[in-house]
Image (cartoon, rainbow, N blue to C red):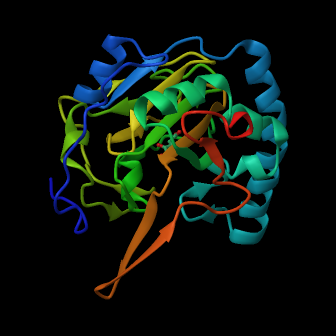
Amino acid sequence: MNRHTLNTDFNWEDREGPFRILTAAQASQYNQEGFFVIDDVFDEETIAGLIEEIDPVEAEFERVVTENFGGKIFIARSGEITFTTHLVTHSEKARAFTQSAFFKDLCFDLLGSDVRLYWDQAVYKKPNNEEIFPWHQDNGYTYVEPQQYLTCWVALTDADEENGCPWVIPKVHRKGTLEHRLTDLGFECFGDDPPESVKVPVRAGGVVVFSSLTPHKTGPNFTTDRIRKSYIVQFAPEGAEMVKLEEGVQSRSLCAEPGRQFAILIDGKAPSQK
Ligand SMILES: O=C(O)CCC(=O)C(=O)O
C-alpha cells in the first residue's frame, strides 16, 4: 500500500463533539473505521421524487454514451454502469435535497461550520453487470486538499450483496490518500478484497457515510433484474482546493465552481439564514 505522491504529511483529525446529529457511536466509528450507516434518513416520497428527476437525465446520458461514444465514456459503460453528474444543475429537487437539514447537520458535525457541495452524481448499476466498481478512495480520483472530505452514498433502491452494495476497508482512511492506478473499470488502490473488507448493505432511503479517504468498492449486479440506483453527494470544507501535479508542476484551484459547488453552511448556518 503506497501513498499518493502528494500525500506527504497527512494526519487524520478525529471529529470531536458537541454534535448536532451524530451519536457518540457514529462519531467513533467514523473516526476509527472511516464509515457508518444511517438507516431510514429519507422517506419514500423524497426518494421517489428524486428518482423521477434523475431517471430522464440518466437515460439521456446513457443514450449519448451509446450513440455518440460507442458505449463507453471514461468509467461509464452503457447497459452496465452510468455516472450522471451534477444533477444539481438539472433539478431544483436535487439541489434542495443536497441542502436538506440532514446534510447540513452532518456536514457541521463532520466538516465544520463552513462547507460547500463538492460533487453530486447518480450511479446506476444495471442488471447483468458482472463487474465490480473497483476499490478506490474518492480522493484518488481528483486530489483535493484538505484530503478528508465527506461522501454520502444515498441508496435510492435497496442495495445488497446481490445487486452491488458498497463494501469498505475500515481504518485505512487514517493513512490519507493512497496511490491509485487507472484500470478499464476505474481507478484502483487495491486489487483483491483484503480480509478486513466489509459489505455495507443499505435500504432505500438510508445513507452510507464515509470519508473521501475510505477505500470502497461496489459489487456486481449479476443475479437480479433490478437497477441498483444511488445518489452520491459529497461535501468539502470552504477553501478546499483541487491539486494537480503535471510534469512536476503543481497547480491548485478552489472547489467553488459557480452553479454547482455552492455553500451549504456559512458560520454554521444555511446561507439564506445568515
Ligand atoms: O455506486 C457505485 O456503484 C460506485 C460509486 C462509487 O464508488 C463512486 O462513485 O465513488
**Where, quadrant-wise, is the C terminus in this rendering?**
top right
Q: Which residue appears at 30% of the width and 25% of the height?
A: 16
Instruction: Give coordinates of residue 200: x percent, y percent.
Output: 40, 22
The residue closer to the viewer here, 204 or 254, is 254
Q: Is residue 273 visible?
A: yes
Decide if residue 9 is on the left or right side of residue 99.
left
On the image, the x and y values in percent for residue 258 come to 70, 62
Q: Which of 211 and 116 is in front in this view?
A: 116
Seen at 62% across and 18% down, the residue is 204
Count numbered badges in the picture: 0
Most extreme residue toward the front is 274
Q: Quadrant of residue 56?
A: top right
User: Is there any visible trace of residue 221 in the rendered image?
Assistant: no
Relative to 269, say whether 186 is above or below.
Answer: below
x 49%, y 40%: residue: 130
Give the image location of residue 128, x and y in percent.
59, 37
Q: Relative to the observer, which residue lies in front, 157 or 163?
A: 157
Is residue 13 placed above or below 67 in the rendered structure? Answer: above
Looking at the image, residue 265 lies above or below residue 144: above
The quarter of the displayed image where residue 146 is located: bottom left
- Residue 212, image quadrant: top left
Q: Where is residue 226 in the image (x, y as percent from the top left)?
A: 66, 26
